[in-house]
């Protein structure tokens, strides 16, 4: 029997005090489990790397000590593919890889080339071998790891899952777009690039600028990239033969419409695809709030476990481009920038209490089967000042009940029943 405890994003930028009673409680809790997972959402270096011109929101970075603190807390398995992986360009990613390797972490999702970023990584426990495949759907095109050739080396990057977004409109509205196209230059560059062989022609939809349209009932749908899915399928098949359990981690900010707490269509498509191909569970994170839980083929899909550690506003340094966003100059400091971004804590992630609450999902797996999932609510100190925000503790009874009730309602949309008893949530997987 293998016992697993899963958490969401660890955006950790500060030291964890080893004398904090509530952190010791978390540590004691995690010690019960064989698999202790989190998504590692920062790069690791000494701020001696060049920043990218753009970032995943904040230029995420921490000094290498955070890895020792996560180990002290109890974690032994990290997903690393996310939208911040290249915030400090390829040098920052390589530094992160080298620090993780030096500390002998089991980590997945980033690599010196596509094969390395895509490969399953394995955790050896006395109860069995666990495989982790880490994927991100939230990334810039240049974040993709590159495949090696006999004559050209690969490229540092993430294990990507691309997707296509198609807007469906009536025949009459599609004709209007085509008329606009005919009398403007909206598609001229694209058409020339296709004609000269620099871009591929797109089949199955009408492209207007960078948007894809089809005739049909009004709405927007998203679909996973089939080439990326095929590569990930091979990794799952490899892992299913080499390990006792296979988990797929998916970092995904993409949402259904403007509803951040609901996953985009392709996320549901991909998550079910992973289970069909042999994964024992899909661990989602990314939007910095939790999403519902689906039980598919008697296996769990956690569409987002929210945040476990969130210290987004205490990154030690930020590049010029960060300050430019808020019309600040070289005389300003990171605190000035974070104040400007949040309007002194009144808007954005810093002002959203849902960013600072989540659950730890835990369960036992015997003979590849899960009978019950336990959901333990946690709070990250929304009420505290910036310096103290973002560290996990077990939620009190009133706060925990509210967290679990919201998760129960979101999960009900996937046909999942969450029972709340004695301050915890439970999902029973029927035979």
Image (tube, grey):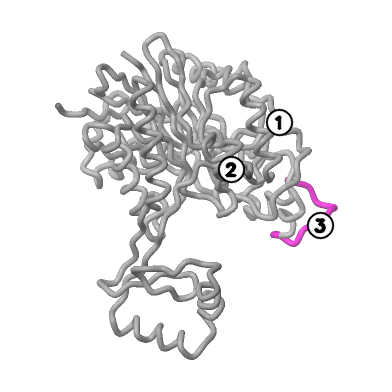
Badge 2 density bin: few <14, some 14–19, many ≥20, Cα 10 Å? many
Callout 3: SS: loop
Residue 66 in the magenta stretch? The answer is: no
Q: Residue at x 36, y 35 (%)?
A: 282
Mark pair 1, 3: CA separation: 25 Å
Q: Which residues are magenta?
A: 325-334
Judge left or right: residue 204 versus residue 150.
left
Residue 381 seen by the camera: no
Q: Residue furthest front?
A: 150
The residue labelled by disc 3 is 329
Q: Position of residue 313 (x, y in %)?
A: 64, 43
Mark 1 or mark 2, which has the lower sequence index? 1
Mark pair 1, 2: CA separation: 20 Å
Badge 1 density bin: few <14, some 14–19, many ≥20, Cα 10 Å? many
Q: Position of residue 356 (x, y in %)?
A: 50, 39
* Residues at marks 3 and 2 touching, judged by CB atoms closer than 8 Å: no
- Find residue 157 and name its label: 2
- Find residue 63 and name its label: 1
Q: Residue furthest right?
A: 331
């Amino acid at each position: 029997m293998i016992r697993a405890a899963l958490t969401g994003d660890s955006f950790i930028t500060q030291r964890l005090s080893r004398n904090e009673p509530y952190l010791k409680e978390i540590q004691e809790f995690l010690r019960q489990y064989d698999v202790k997972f989190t998504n590692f959402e920062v790069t690791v270096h000494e701020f001696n790397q060049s920043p990218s011109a753009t970032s995943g929101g904040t230029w995420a970075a921490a000094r290498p000590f955070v890895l020792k603190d996560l180990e002290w807390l109890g974690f032994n398995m990290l997903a690393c593919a996310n939208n911040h992986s290249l915030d400090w360009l390829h040098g920052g990613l390589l530094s992160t890889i080298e620090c993780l390797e030096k500390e002998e972490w089991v980590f997945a999702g980033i690599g010196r080339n596509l094969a390395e970023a895509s490969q399953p990584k394995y955790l050896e426990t006395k109860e069995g071998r666990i495989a982790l495949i880490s994927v991100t759907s939230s990334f810039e095109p240049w974040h993709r790891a590159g495949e090696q050739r006999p004559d050209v080396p690969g490229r540092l990057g993430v294990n990507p899952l691309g997707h296509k977004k198609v807007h469906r409109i009536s025949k009459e509205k599609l004709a209007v777009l085509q008329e606009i196209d005919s009398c403007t230059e909206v598609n001229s560059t694209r058409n020339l690039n296709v004609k000269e062989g620099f871009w591929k022609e797109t089949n199955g939809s009408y492209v207007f600028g960078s948007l894809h349209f089809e005739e049909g009932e009004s709405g927007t749908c998203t679909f996973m990239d089939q080439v990326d899915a095929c590569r990930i399928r091979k990794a799952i098949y490899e892992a299913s033969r080499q390990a006792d359990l296979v988990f797929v981690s998916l970092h995904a900010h993409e949402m259904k419409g403007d509803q951040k707490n609901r996953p985009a269509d392709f996320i549901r498509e991909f998550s079910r695809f992973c289970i069909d191909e042999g994964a024992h569970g899909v661990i989602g994170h990314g939007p910095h709030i939790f999403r519902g839980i689906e039980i598919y083929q008697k296996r769990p899909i956690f569409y987002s476990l929210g945040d476990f550690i969130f210290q987004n506003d205490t990154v030690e340094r930020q590049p010029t481009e960060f300050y430019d966003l808020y019309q600040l100059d070289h005389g300003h400091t990171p605190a000035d920038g974070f104040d400007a971004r949040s309007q002194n804590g009144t808007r954005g992630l810093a002002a959203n209490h849902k960013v600072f609450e989540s659950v730890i999902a835990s369960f036992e797996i015997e003979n590849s089967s899960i009978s019950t999932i336990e959901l333990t609510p946690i709070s990250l100190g929304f009420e505290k000042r910036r310096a103290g925000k973002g560290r996990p503790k077990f939620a009190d009874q009133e706060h925990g009940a509210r967290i679990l009730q919201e998760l129960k309602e979101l999960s009900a949309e996937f046909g999942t029943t969450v029972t709340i008893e004695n301050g915890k949530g439970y999902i029973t997987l029927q035979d």
